[in-house]
Image: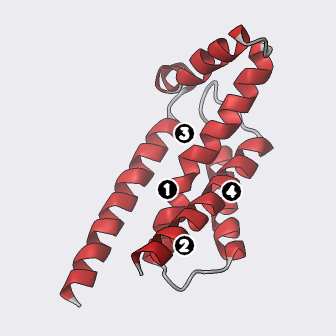
Amino acid sequence: MLVRQYATWWLKTLFIAYLVALAFVVFLPAREASTVTGFVGVIAGWLSVLGIPQEAAGIGVEFMANIVMFVPFGVFVRLLKPTLWKWWPLALLAAASSGTIEVVQLLIPGRVTAWSDIVANTLGALAGLVVAKRLASTIR
């Protein structure tokens, strides 16, 4: 019982650290955010060498980055709420959280909001749910 409480405490601590890092990335003003997330342009530049138009590559890389950014969200929620096996409550939570981020970004100078971010973030959280389920079944 003590080991489970200790593990839960660590999971909660790591989830809070993840949320702080996430807030740092999504709530920075546009100029500062570009220095943190500048990898999107770099990867798009690499893909343009392969013949993919840089603008299209940038959109695709940003979409994938949003998915990857929310995978830990799904993992942490699933691990902290072991009874959460259905995908739709997590999808609603992720979509609501992402929607809140997009609304707050409307107030931040230079930030751009997009429905595609909500879709990508929700897909990332659902991917995290799958990862957590696989981890749980592997551990058993």
Residue 133's label in the rendered image is 2
Task: Please state which of the two labelled residues, at mark 1 or mark 2, is closer to the viewer.
Answer: 2
The answer to whether residue 124 shows anywhere in this view is yes
Residue at (23%, 91%) from the top-left corner?
A: 1
Amino acid type at mark 4: Thr
The residue carrying mark 3 is: 26
Residue reaching furthest left? Answer: 2
Residue reaching furthest bottom? Answer: 1
Dividing the picture into quadrants, the one containing residue 53 is top right
Question: Residues under labels 1 and 4: Cα distance?
Answer: 12 Å
User: Counting residues from the N terminus, which is met first, the one under dot 3 or under dot 4?
Assistant: 3
- Disc 1 is placed on an element classified as helix
Amino acid type at mark 3: Val
The residue carrying mark 4 is: 122
User: Counting residues from the N terminus, which is met first, the one under dot 3 or under dot 1?
Assistant: 3
Dividing the picture into quadrants, the one containing residue 125 is bottom right
- Disc 2 is placed on an element classified as helix
